[in-house]
Each structure stands twice: as C-alpha cells, then as structure tokens.
Amino acid sequence: MGDVRVGSVWQYPVKSMQGREVDEIRIGPAGVAGDRAYGFVDVETGKLASAKRPRRFGPLLDCHARFLTPPTGDGDSPPIEVTLPDGAVVRTDTDGGAELTKRVNELLGREMQLISTAPEGIALDELIPQIDGLGENALEAMQTEPDSHGDSFIPIPAAMAAPGTLLDLAAMHVLATSTLNRMADAHPDGDWNVRRMRPNILIDDTAEPCDENDWLGCDLHIGEEVVVHIVGPTPRCVMTTLAQPGLPKDSNVLKTVAQVNMREMGALGQFPCAGSYAEVVSPGVVRRGDPIRFERVEPRKGALAATIDMMTAALSSGNQ
C-alpha cells in the first residue's frame, strides 16, 4: 500500500458535543485519552444523553467543547471549556461543572446531570430513521412504541465493547478519506465534511485510495509506536444527517451510505457502514502526518466481536 498517513486527529471531550481537531492524541489501552470523557444523564429517565435522539438531545451538537489541558489517560480527565449556541463560554475548573449543567438544563429544557464515569448498565436511545434503503436488522426487534412525534427508538447499552466509558460501542473509530470520497461521488450535492462521521483518526489515503472494507483483520501501525487492530465496520445512524454548525440537515447522507456500503455484522444483519472500529494493540501518541502501515494478521477476537456474539445470543433467546 502506498503513501497512507494520518490526515487529522480529533478529540470529543463531551458526548454529542462538537469535537476539536488537534495536533496529536494519546492512545491508551482502552482507546483515545479523553474521548467522550464527559456526558450528561437525563435525570428523569436515567438515560445517557445522545443526539441519536435528536428531538430531545440534538441541541448538544450546537455546543463546542475543548479540554483546558491535554488529557493523558492517567487519572481524572482535565477540566473543559464549552461554548454554547448563544456564544456563552463556560468552564468546569472553578465550580466542578455546576454552571455548565445549569446551562445545558436550559438548553435542553430538562434536568440533566454531568458525569465523567459511566454508571453500570447505562443506556442511550437511538432513533430509527424513516429513510428508504436502510433495510432491516435484528436490533429493530428491540424498538420502542412510537412516541407522540411518531419516533421509535432502540435502547442501546452504552460502550458494550468498551466497558466503563461513555463511548457508543468500541474503543476507537477510524475513517478513510477514500470512504468519504466514495460517498461524495454517490451524493455530490451533500456536504461530506468529516465532522458528520466523528472519527478519532481520519486516514488520508488520497495518494492511493483504499477499500476500507478490506481492512478487517488488519493491524494498522501508526507512527513509531501505535498499533490498532481493525475489528469491524462502523454502523452509521441518524446523527450523520443532523444539522450542526456549518453543516445542513441532510437525510440523503444516511441513505447514500446505505446505497454504497451495507455490511453484515454477524447474525445481527445488515447496517449502513462508513469507517471502521478498532481496538488498541500497542498504545502511544498519534500525530497528524504520521505514516500508516497495514499488516494482515490473524483476526483478533476482541471485545467488539464478543459483543456481537453476546447480542446475537440474547436476541435469539428472546425470540424463542
């Protein structure tokens, strides 16, 4: 494979808020240091707030968060600064997040609790979008009855393959520029800014475009010390379609992903996918411009594969 490099690296201090492109990120055994280090819990429901339920929590996407000092992955996460949609800037280093929580309560019109560790068993709601071409999968058997807006949701346990975190599923998410370009070719009127997909690492394979579907079972050697193993495709959700600062709402984004790249995830069925989930083999620092080398290895049955097996077994048991 030719000249493939790290195009950009991203931090997302608060779940469902805007992230920030940075010069480098530190990769620990459990993933990117500081990734979704903070989040909010809906006090009424006990659910983790996610823009995957856009009518209730979508305004979080209009907020920008950054760390006041770089996270190291050791001990508590550093305090953050959040810029709210009205331009107000709130920091958590003086009051432990009390003012930020107050402002988020006002923004969402709900009582929220700021957290930095994931309570055991916490879940989030994911909207089932009414978009042609998405197909069906086994998770739809878990959907709720439609609410007053006609929206149905799938309750998803948080961070099933990254226990103790506020991540959606796996430890890391990487994405290739060639994948975005394929989507843009299929939907040229769309804005395929990387911020729609929210990866930790954007892999620049412009010089020699790759097929990201071929990465499954590969180790990616990044820079001088980091090695991550590609364990599965990244299923996409309604968040890719939502309006956010500088990006319009576009339901055709998810429809296009479904047209271009439906992938099997075991017995769970098919999902529209763009990007790849990865697990950490060797930790270290990843910097913009670092070279990437691919190595085909024996597939490692990591946390994501085990999670898919567990979910498949649970669904099969429930349908008997």
Image: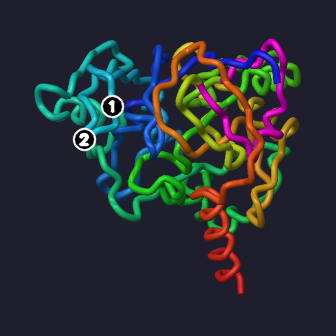
The residue depicted at 87 percent of the width and 35 percent of the height is 260
Residue 199 visible in rendering: yes
Q: For the view shown, which residue lies furthest in the bottom direction?
A: 320
Q: Which residues are magenta?
A: 203-222
The residue depicted at 48 percent of the width and 37 percent of the height is 283
Identify the element where label 1 is drawn. loop
Is the residue 250 above or below the residue 31 in the image? above
Is the residue 153 above or below the residue 51 in the image? below
The residue depicted at 72 percent of the width and 54 percent of the height is 299
**Where residue 25 sits: x, y (%)?**
45, 25
Q: Quadrant of residue 114?
A: top left
**Where residue 200 sits: x, y (%)?**
55, 30
Identify the element where label 2 is drawn. loop
Quadrant position of the N terminus in the picture? top right
Relative to 112, 98 lies left or right? left
Please name the residue that numbered disc 1 is placed on: 72
**Where residue 206 sits: x, y (%)?**
78, 14
Please name the residue that numbered disc 2 is placed on: 75
Q: Residues within 10 Å of mark 2 (few under 14, many from 20)?
A: few
